[in-house]
Amino acid sequence: MTIRTRTRAFSLVELVIVVVIIGVIAAIAVPRISRGARGAGESALRGDLAAMRNAIDLYAAEHVGTFPLAGTFEAQLTLFSSAVNTTSATKDTTFKYGPYLRALPPLPVSGEGVALGGKLGDTAVAAADAAGVGWLYTEGTGVIVANTGTADDEATVLYNTY
């Protein structure tokens, strides 16, 4: 007497159904994941702008209403400063203010570095804006914005209006 053993396997129809289900799930998940990454960049931009604006305001409060100068903006916010807006890497009785930031953050929504475009409205800023470089800063008012040109978020709000 012979005993027959039966092997079980998936049929081709069952395999096709599983592959179709995995494809549908992937088609739903991939766009949601990419939107999440874009949302993270937008949140980082808002956070970076808030931190830099707070640092600029604190600088102005400690320097009798004088905002950092565009040409030395990064140094004035990341080093110790004196009452007359000069900077030093070490703190002493003359350089007793700051630093206000550890480093100037890169622009999170365009992948650009930390280059500062200068004062808004300057002709040099027009060239920096066309190149999409870093941040744009107005030293007279302390306004800082992202230099993103016409790039916008999911709600079609321009990044440079944040």
Image (spheres, rainbow, N blue to C red):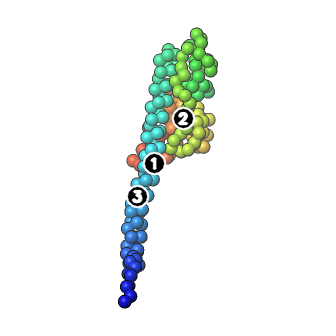
| SS label for mark 1 | helix
Q: Nearer the viewer, mark 1 or mark 3?
A: 3
| 85 to 32, vertically: above or below | above
- Nearer the observer: mark 2 or 3; the answer is 3
Q: Is residue 160 left or right of residue 18?
A: right
Labelled disc at residue 158: none
Closer to the chain start, of discs 1 and 3, is 3
Amino acid on which disc 2 is placed: Pro
Q: Could you tell me residue 39's position as x and y percent?
A: 43, 46
Residue under the image location 54 percent in, 22 percent down: 99
Mark 3 or mark 2, which is nearer the start of the sequence? Answer: 3
Residue sitting nearer the eye, 142 or 96: 96
Question: What is the distance, in whole Å, between disc 2 and disc 3 at their CAs?
Answer: 31 Å
Q: Residue at x 55, y 38 (%)?
A: 106
Give how far across and how far down residue 29 sits, in percent. Answer: 40, 58
Q: What secondary structure is marked by label 3?
A: helix
As helix, strand or loop, the secondary structure at mark 2 comes to loop
Amino acid of disc 1: Arg
Q: Is residue 58 above or below residue 41?
A: above
Q: Amino acid at mark 3?
A: Ala
Name the residue beneath numbered marker 1: 38
Question: Does label 2 or label 1 sit earlier along the sequence?
Answer: 1
Q: Can you give x and y, in whole percent of width and height, for residue 135 in the image?
A: 54, 36
Residue 84 in sight from this viewpoint: no
Q: Which mark is residue 29?
A: 3
Asked if the residue under mark 3 is in contact with the one under mark 1, i.e. CB atoms within 8 Å, the reply is no
Which quarter of the picture shows residue 4? bottom left
- The numbered disc on residue 105 is 2
How far is disc 1 from disc 3 in space, using C-alphas? Answer: 15 Å
**Residue at point 45% right, 35% down?**
47
Tell me the quarter of the picture where residue 85 sits: top right
